[in-house]
Image (cartoon, rainbow, N blue to C red):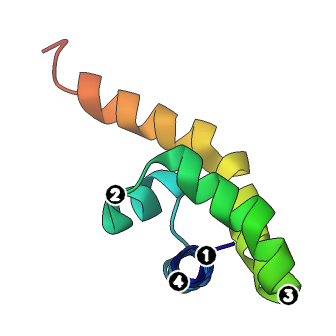
Amino acid sequence: MKGYIEERAVELANYIIENKATVRAAAKKFGISKSTVHKDVTERLVQINSVLAEEAKAVLDKNKAERHIRGGLATRAKYKGKSE
């Protein structure tokens, strides 16, 4: 694995952990695709730093479990006031 990919994976994990960021937010911040973020954090990072990978995965799992709530809130905000 190339050095810059390893660095990016570690930076992504640190960003996700520090900011409790979603895959989408991390992808936007680093200017890469969501698929790349996911692959870096779940596959590549395990080979580099397994402890950091577990911490990042915990944040991503929590975000995944809560995404239906965020979606519902976004829909509610979108339609609030349209029926008036």
For the residues labelled 3 and 2, the Cα–Cα distance comes to 25 Å
Between disc 1 and disc 3, the foreground one is: 1
For the residues labelled 4 and 3, the Cα–Cα distance comes to 14 Å
Q: Which residue is mark 4?
A: 11
Label 2 Cα crowd, 10 Å radius (few <14 / some 14-19 / many 20+) = few
For the residues labelled 1 and 2, the Cα–Cα distance comes to 22 Å
From this viewpoint, is residue 56 visible? Answer: yes
Mark 1 or mark 4: name the one nearer the start of the chain: 1
Tag shown at residue 2:
1
> Residue 55: horizontal and vertical position, in percent?
77, 80
The residue under the point 69% across, 72% down is 1
Mark 1 or mark 2: name the one nearer the start of the chain: 1
- Left/right placement of residue 84 relative to residue 36 reads left
* Residue sitting at the far front: 2
> Residue 7: horizontal and vertical position, in percent?
55, 84
> Residue 33: horizontal and vertical position, in percent?
44, 48
Q: Amino acid at mark 3?
A: Val
Q: Amino acid at mark 1?
A: Lys
- Left/right placement of residue 77 relative to residue 27 reads left
Q: Is residue 20 above or below residue 11?
A: above
Q: Which residue is mark 3?
A: 51
Tag shown at residue 28:
2
Mark 1 or mark 3: name the one nearer the start of the chain: 1
